[in-house]
Amino acid sequence: MRVLRSPTPVYVNEANDDFFYIRDGNGTRQLNRADTVRYVSEHFD
């Protein structure tokens, strides 16, 4: 399966809270809020 990169950040909403995940090698990792802000500012326009 090939998944294209999203042009904007995508959040998962669960129980009225938003979560942000990134690919980490061949896995997925949830980022905390501070790391999410940093990651989004570095990877999205």
Image (cartoon, rainbow, N blue to C red):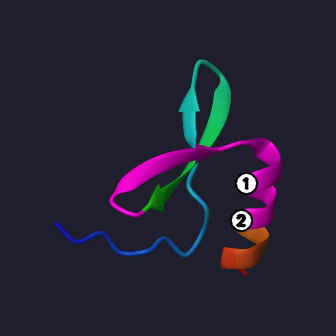
User: Which quadrant is home to the N terminus?
Assistant: bottom left
| Residue 45 in the image: above or below residue 16 | below
Residue 1 covered by magenta stretch: no
Q: Position of residue 8 (x, y in %)?
A: 60, 69
**Mark 1 burial class by Cα count in 10 Å: few <14, some 14-19, many 20+:** some
Residue position marked by numbered label 1 in the rendering: 36
Q: Are marks 1 and 2 in contact (CB under 8 Å)?
A: yes
Q: Which mark is residue 28?
A: none
Instruction: Tell me the residue at 44%/74% (across/down).
Output: 5
Instruction: Tell me the residue at 59%/18% (across/down).
Output: 15
Q: Position of residue 10 (x, y in %)?
A: 56, 55
- Residue closest to the far front: 25
Instruction: Tell me the residue at 37%/52% (across/down).
Output: 27
SS label for mark 2:
helix
SS label for mark 1:
helix
Q: Which mark is residue 39?
A: 2
Instruction: Tell me the residue at 83%/50% (across/down).
Output: 34
Q: Position of residue 17 (x, y in %)?
A: 67, 27
| Residue 21 in the image: above or below residue 14 | below
- Residue closest to the far top: 15
Q: Alpha carbon of mark 1 to alpha carbon of mark 2: how far?
A: 5 Å
Residue 26 occupies quadrant? bottom left
Q: Is residue 44 visible?
A: no
**Which span is picked out in magenta?**
25-39
Q: Position of residue 13 (x, y in %)?
A: 57, 33
